[in-house]
């Protein structure tokens, strides 16, 4: 697992892999958002309210998924910290 923080907006990001997915999970004062992609890294990104929550939307691009996650957390997408291991998510 790799982590990153954006202290100025109070967001923590955690990247990890399961048997089937790559997951980037954000937390801001108890509000959460997650971006998931299949383990092989070639499928669309799924945005969820939590890592194991129901899918809200799918995106091809990482920037669009970050935008949606930012909306869920109430921060600008460019303020979201992204651990290095997650930087290549998206198609």
Image (spheres, rainbow, N blue to C red):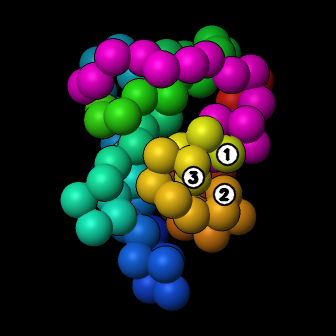
Residue 60 within the magenta-colored segment of the rendering: yes
- Graded by Cα atoms within 10 Å as few (under 14), some (14 to 19) or many (20 or more), the crowding at tag 1 reads some
Q: Tell me what residue is drawn at x 56 percent, y 19 percent.
A: 57
Q: Which residue is mark 3?
A: 70
Task: Mark 2 and mark 3 in contact? Answer it, CB < 8 Å.
Answer: yes
- Graded by Cα atoms within 10 Å as few (under 14), some (14 to 19) or many (20 or more), the crowding at tag 3 reads some
Task: Mark 1 and mark 2 in contact? Answer it, CB < 8 Å.
Answer: yes
Q: Is residue 70 left or right of residue 63?
A: left
Cα–Cα gap, marks 2 and 3: 5 Å
Residue nearer the viewer, 74 or 37: 74
Q: Is residue 75 above or below residue 20?
A: below
The circle drawn on residue 67 is 1
Asked whether the viewer can see residue 41, the reply is no
Residue 62 image offset from top left, x and y in percent = 70, 37
Q: Is residue 80 above or below residue 63?
A: below
Q: Secondary structure at mark 2?
A: helix
Q: Which residue is mark 2?
A: 77
Q: Is residue 33 above or below residue 3?
A: above
Residue 13 image offset from top left, x and y in percent = 41, 59
- Quadrant where the C terminus is found in the figure: top right
Mark sitting earlier along the chain (2/3): 3
Residue 87 image offset from top left, x and y in percent = 64, 50
Residue 49 image offset from top left, x and y in percent = 36, 34
Q: Is residue 10 left or right of residue 76?
A: left
Residue nearer the viewer, 19 or 23: 23
Task: Mark 1 and mark 3 in contact? Answer it, CB < 8 Å.
Answer: yes
């Amino acid at each position: 697992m790799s982590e990153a923080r954006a202290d100025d907006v109070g967001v923590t990001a955690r990247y990890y892999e399961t048997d089937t997915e790559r997951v980037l999970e954000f937390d801001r004062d108890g509000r959460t958002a997650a971006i998931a992609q299949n383990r092989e890294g070639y499928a669309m990104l799924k945005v969820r309210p939590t890592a194991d929550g129901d899918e809200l939307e799918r995106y091809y691009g990482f920037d669009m998924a970050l935008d949606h996650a930012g909306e869920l957390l109430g921060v600008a997408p460019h303020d979201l910290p992204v651990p290095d291991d997650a930087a290549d998510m998206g198609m």
